[in-house]
Amino acid sequence: MIFDMDIETLPREELEALQLKRLKGLCERVYANVAFYRKAFDELGVKPSDIKSLADVRYLPFTEKQDLRNHYPFGLFAVPKDNVVRIHASSGTTGRATVAGYTQRDVNNWATMMARSLTAAGASRRDIIHVAYGYGLFTGGLGAHYGAERLGATTVPVSGGGTRRQAMLLRDFGATVLCCTPSYSLVLYETALEAGIDLKELPLRIGVFGAEPWTDEMRREIEKKMGIKAIDIYGLSEVMGPGVGIECVEAQNGAHLQEDHFLCEVIDPETKEPVKPGEVGELVITTLTKEAQPLIRYRTRDITRLETVPCKCGRTTARMVRVQGRSDDMLIIRGVNVFPSQIESILLETEGLTPYYQLVVEREGNLDTLTVQVEVDEKIFSDEVRKLQRLEGKIQKNIKEFLGVTALVKLVEPRAIQRSEGKAKRVLDLRHA
Amino acid sequence: MKAEQISIFLENRAGRLEEVTRVLAEADISIRALSLADTSDFGILRLIVSDHEKAKVALKEHGFTVGRNAVVAVEVPDAPGGLHSILKLLCAGGINVEYMYAFVHQCEKSAVIIVRFDRTDQAIELLQKNNIPIIPGEQLYKI
Ligand SMILES: [Zn+2]
């Protein structure tokens, strides 16, 4: 099924004409209302009126995550604050979170895109949708929630945690669609089994999973264990939240991007030039319709390639083949974005030092685990076990508090952390090793 | 009356302790007393050695994190209740023992306890006032 038949199956020429019209309007809006963009346009010597074709987007400035941090909290808003009806924010230490604002129209558009997404995943108004993404500043919970209601489905706002209870609710309410991170779905499955509930026996038939990278092997495992279709949903809070892209249940081969709202480019992250059509590079998104906080050429750091050959589901929108990696070393741990620099600032705040550290990410069973190895130098060393254990506990607590992720802190000997060319290797991701 | 102890941070990994003893042996340093405190992922080795300055330099050269702490070597009569009476005294004086370890004096009829106090100077004062023998550092290193 297709939620917005007219838009989602628009011939590409018409879609591109719509994108161009919206891009021109967007450039006018940001140039007039956002000081950051006016300055960036001026520095490149480009005027909104210079945009004559979609390809001209390459003359526009990029927006980086750091730009959002630099203008924390509301510096990139393009509308008066009175018109902003909602704020979301990504994790970050104090003052370094990235904020996203939404007008009523932004929230409505998001709900529609999420309803389209759920429909593409195979859901309809007859479904009961169990939303186990966290509700709050994180976009996952509310994003899925509003979309499920827009679709007209029965929405169960469970949020995260309380896994055993979630299993009982899944059984008692007879949910047919589950929205959560892929790793959490497996935790839920195991916990339910321990409580004597086999998800395979329940009416559950679709899983809409996102907010962290996952492999095809994991998808097969989930589908086999739970007897459901596992659908990949793509999104990022900076440009909107979940629902920027969604796989269709018919093909399950790359997320269809909501191109009437997002202009998607793929660039070479080194040269920053567009790659040839169909080639691999970094996904760059321009939010064509966002009112509160529109972004021009936002660098997602997600490595992918776009497929525009017609899909068997009938949608004409481009599909991004599964995200292959990140162009910087951001880690996604159980759906939470973690940057090595954030851990570094927590260590600095904890003891006022710059110790060597390394982040080790592993997958134990189905859950990602993060170990922060901290080298013990003379400044933090103590001959008393208690003091070192207290330090471990303090770092662990601060990471949990500021980043919302549980990490194991392990003290190690100096030079235990591999250095290459004198520089410590900050991240060791063993999840796909 | 204080004695210098060196402490070394060790990961719980095969061969680390052996590496310490090798470095010390190569530097011609004798170990007088030692204690190893460990948790599931790290350990702290505390040593009284014949030459703590030299030991520290040698260990640091080999990449170890080394600390130096003031401890007190208390002579405990080799008789029932010997240690108890000393601890009772310290406890009454409001002095806490962070940790301690013992070694047996080879020629005398007493045990030596190496103690790390929270307030070292006050501990020494109290012990001396009660005529409890303390082995000075210089003597301890040569035992
Ligand atoms: Zn499709």
Image (spheres, rainbow, N blue to C red):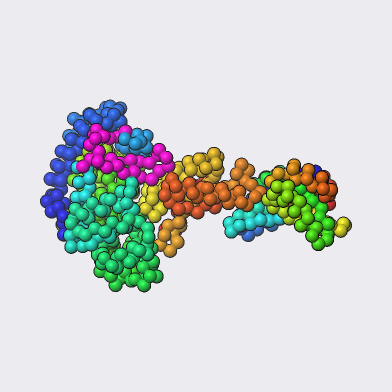
* Residue A379 coordinates in the image, percent (x, y): 61, 42
Frontmost residue, A278 versus A46: A46
* Residue A328 coordinates in the image, percent (x, y): 40, 45
For residue A223, which quarter of the picture? bottom left
* Residue A303 coordinates in the image, percent (x, y): 33, 49
Residue A239 in view of the camera: yes
The residue located at (80%, 58%) in the rendering is B82
The residue located at (17%, 39%) in the rendering is A22
User: Is A219 drawn above or below residue A237 in the view shown?
Assistant: below
Which range is magenta? A75-104
The residue located at (37%, 58%) in the rendering is A161
* Residue A232 coordinates in the image, percent (x, y): 29, 57
Residue A268 in view of the camera: no
User: Is A184 drawn above or below residue B66 in the view shown?
Assistant: below
Frontmost residue, A308 versus A214: A214
User: Is A250 drawn above or below residue A279 in the view shown?
Assistant: below
For residue B61, which quarter of the picture? top right
Report whether A244 appears left or right of B14: left
The residue located at (24%, 64%) in the rendering is A176
Magenta includes A85?
yes
Furthest toward the front, the residue is: B92
Magenta includes B79?
no
Frontmost residue, A140 versus B22: A140
